[in-house]
Amino acid sequence: MNTLIFRTVAPYLSALMMLFSVFVLLRGHNEPGGGFIGGLIAVSAFAIYGIACGVSAVRRAMKFHPMSIAASGLLLAVVSVLPSLFFSQPAMTSQWLALPFLGTVIDLSTPLFFDIGVYLVVVGAISSIALSLEERAD
Amino acid sequence: MPLFGVEATFWALLGPFVAAALSPFLAKTLKHNAAWLLAVIPALAFLQFLSIVPGIAEGQTFKASLEWVPTFNVNFSIYLDGLSVLFALLISGIGTLITLYAGGYLKGHENLGQFLSYLFLFMGAMLGVVVADNVITLFVYWELTSITSFLLIGFDHLRRASRRSAVQALVVTGGGGLALMAGLILAGYQGGSFELSELLNSGDVLRESPYYTAIFILVVLGAFTKSAQFPFHFWLPNAMEAPTPVSAYLHSATMVKAGVYLLMRMHPVLGDTELWMTVLPIFGGITLLVGTILGIRQTDLKLVLAYTTVASLGLLVMLTGTSDPVAIQGAVIYLFAHSLFKGSLFMVVGTVDHESGTRDLNRVGGLFSLMPITGTAAVLSALSMAGLPPLVGFVAKEVLYDGTWHAVNGGLWTGFAVLGNAMMFALAATVAIKPFFGAKVKTPKVAHEGTVLLVAGSITLAVLGLAAGAFIASVGHQLLSPMTSAILGTPFDEELHLFPTYLSPALYLSLATIALGIIIFMYMDKLRVIVADALRTIGWGPDKGFDQVLEVIIRFATALTQTVQTGSMVTYMRATFTVIALVLFVPMILTGNWPKLQGIGSFYAYEWFIAAIAVIGVYAVLTARYRVTAIVLLGIQGFAVALIYLLFGAPDLAFTQFMVETLSVVILALVMTRLNLKPTDARSSRGKVFDISLSVLCGAGISMLLMSIIQLPFDPTLSEFFTQYSRTIAHGRNIVNVILVDFRGFDTIGEISVVMVTGLAVLALIRVRPKSNGNSNSEKNR
Amino acid sequence: METLFSVLVGILFAGSIYLLLSRKLVRILLGIAILGNAVNLLIFTAGRLTRDVPPIIPLKSYLPVEATANPLPQALVLTAIVISFSFLAFFLVLGYRAYQELGTDDLLDMRVAEPKEHSEPPLGY
């Protein structure tokens, strides 16, 4: 399995999958996709990279400890509950902000940040599980 | 008028809890001197209650209330009348002195902060018990006193005796507390209010209620266990395992009187019936005699006091049980006097123990010249305990004799009282004379007077006993008569005199008591041997019985557990799924509501194909010979399910399922390839047949359940709501995603938290590994 | 249409329960994996099936123009898939560690919590 071709292709494949996972995450509100799926795609990307280049390479690539990523995701999700409180609305009421950007309009919203939080939790927690299991295999 | 208003009482109630939070920190920095600072808090509470006294003496009562759980009629409400205020004064006043005493007694102890913290927690709980108006609030505080008492008795938890006594006290008082809760709730429903202040007016309703006997038994159980009445008296002497400040405070002056408080509080509601006037005096009288007789047996000064406390509590219950106004006035004075002299005597014994190194009657003597202040306190308090003039204890005895003499069945109760008091007289003499007078005995430590912290409490209480005797008329008017009125439910104010104004029967009874007491004192040593021999012959007591009951319960529980929980996981699983199969089939069999067999509808060929793949996948996993094969085959049914999602309008699910199946196979393969496992199924063929039938039965049951569900009309309300508002309100076109991150976002937070926790758990399982044979070590260290 | 799926769900359940009743850790883990799918499919089917049309509102519209699949069970199942996966991973590691510590994968030999020989009840204080 650990062939030269696989090892050469794996980083590019992983990078593409990461990109795809972010794409799936961001379009999730309107098209099929979302934080859960995006997160799982990203985990698969890390898994492939890990099988090809080893766990330590993945850990380096991730920069942070996977559980820290998961924890910050949970924090982000919880924080995105709060903004509505400033407008005297029940917690979690979604807030929308349309930003014009290079001729198009980008919708920023609290559900988007919530979904990013979900994405981070899934990425962090599941890649942590996968990595620690792979580590034992080394 | 109250100093800061009635509402300030809430602050007085909160104060001890604040002190409890502060104690560990103050004790760390200030050591034993923290006691000076901390004693300010109960002192302030004392002043607050004192400021209420003039109003109470004029016949007023005060109420205040905060809402707690209004739906269940539970309020944080307080009610201040003569009864609660005198108790609150004793708790906060003696509490102040005990705080100081504890600082001196545990000077240099490493856990002083913790000790003071428990003590303040208890103080707060006890104040709550006596001022609570709502019965639920009362119960919560009541249990809190049991728990803090447990913590304080078990303070020296390294000793087995301490642990045993603590558990015993908790089981007895906590068990009684449960009975009390049932009784109070029953009383609340019968009387139509959960506020004591309102319940007090519905005495006639309750006395005629068909539940009166039940309420009476339950409440009395609560009171008897707490106040150590025979046959529950055994926990109190055992509680002397606690450090002496605890014995002085909880187990003589305050907590054990909570039961008496409760009986007095409920007297207008439950009292004055035949049941009340039979049960209470009999049990109280027996407790009085048992306590004093067992007290004679003891040589440990602290245990002598403990048994006389049991006796005094019996006396109080007996007097309350007569329902006679004068006898109850006697109980009130006696309760007041007892708190002063017994608190003081406990502190004296603690000081003697602390300074001389022993509290055994036969190893101390002639200490008066070495410890003059402590000695004076001992003598004054013992005089009060013996019921001699001019101490307040004398007045108490006069009034209570007067009461019992005229009460219903008065002769019997008077007999109990005279006998008990005579023995109490002898024991008081023992406690005061033995250690302080007579020939000097060499003690383990060279005795000298205790520090200010140690002697302040005992001498203050002793002098108060003297002062209360001297000013008995005004003390009676301001403090005691209002309490009697509260207990009786009708105004009562008779002037009290230190010395009898005429030759009443009470005076003759008093003289008889003293004479009898002197005789008993003279033959004390002989009596002690006789009682000891008698007890040895009996050889069994409730104390031993407690252990036996506990052993029976534990053995029964163990036997039952071992029968039900065989330890075989296979049996558990079979039992679980058998129950599931029963749950699925029994209702269908009983109601005859079998799902109707319908045509399976039209399917495309590829749909049949996918369903077939899923079935084949499951079958292949079941029959796989090698685990790697099984794991790869597991993927097959997973992907088939994903295809089903895709075909039936759920692309999100399909993608997620694809990813998850892939990752599952990867991690299963990662782990399983490293386990050296035999893939064979180790079941016997009979077991296999059973398991196959069971699983087929469950599967069929679930199939039929699902068919029945589908044959019910579909309720699309929720789905339509989400569909309708997904774009219009939540600005999202993917309805599934909008539900997840917007409509039901809180659920999603819960779910990602679960994912997070499993991540942490896996990390912990992999990272944390015990060192070699760590298992057996941790087993031993337990 | 749902009847076929009811039968399929029943078969998945039966298979997973047979595996769960086994004595071997590996088979139990496989059973848990299948059980997750079975439950998800149960919820999905109970919410009624609609072919092909995902619950997504077209770009130009504020409401779906044709009858879509029921979004509610999909939302429930989506999170359930992820959670059952993370639990599968947890059980896997738990079983793996148990195997390492106890040296067996046979449930009948895993008796640390409930030892075979009956011990005296704890009567002390």
Image (cartoon, coloured by chain):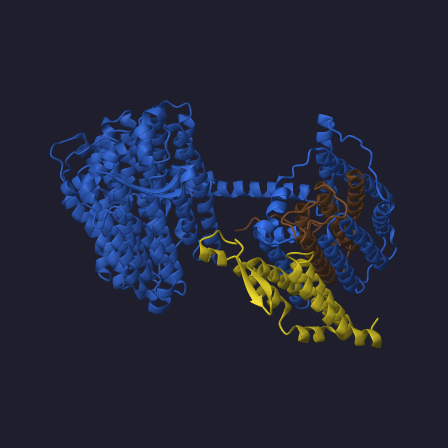
Q: Position of residue B353 (x, y in %)?
A: 33, 58
Q: Position of residue C98 (x, y in %)?
A: 71, 59
Is residue B369 visible in the rendered image? The answer is yes
Q: Position of residue B218 (x, y in %)?
A: 42, 33
Q: Position of residue B8 (x, y in %)?
A: 27, 50
Q: Is residue A31 left or right of residue B621?
A: left
Chain ID, yellow in image: A
Q: Kindly give the residue lying farthest to the left in the view shown.
A: B501
Q: Is residue B145 left or right of residue B668?
A: left
State the quadrant of the N terminus of chain C.
top right
Q: Is residue B470 left or right of residue A70?
A: left
Judging depth in this view, the residue of B571 and B700 nearest the camera is B700
Count of marks overlaid on the render: 0
**x 43%, y 38%: residue:** B71
Q: Quadrant of residue B574?
A: top right
Judging depth in this view, the residue of B592 and B731 nearest the camera is B731
Judging depth in this view, the residue of B19 and C26 nearest the camera is C26
Chain C, hue in figure: brown
Chain ID, blue in image: B
Q: Is residue B761 above or below residue B302?
A: below
Is residue B776 visible in the rendered image? The answer is no
**x 65%, y 37%: residue:** B715
Q: Quadrant of residue B600?
A: top right
Q: Is residue B374 left or right of residue B171?
A: left
Judging depth in this view, the residue of B521 and B753 nearest the camera is B753
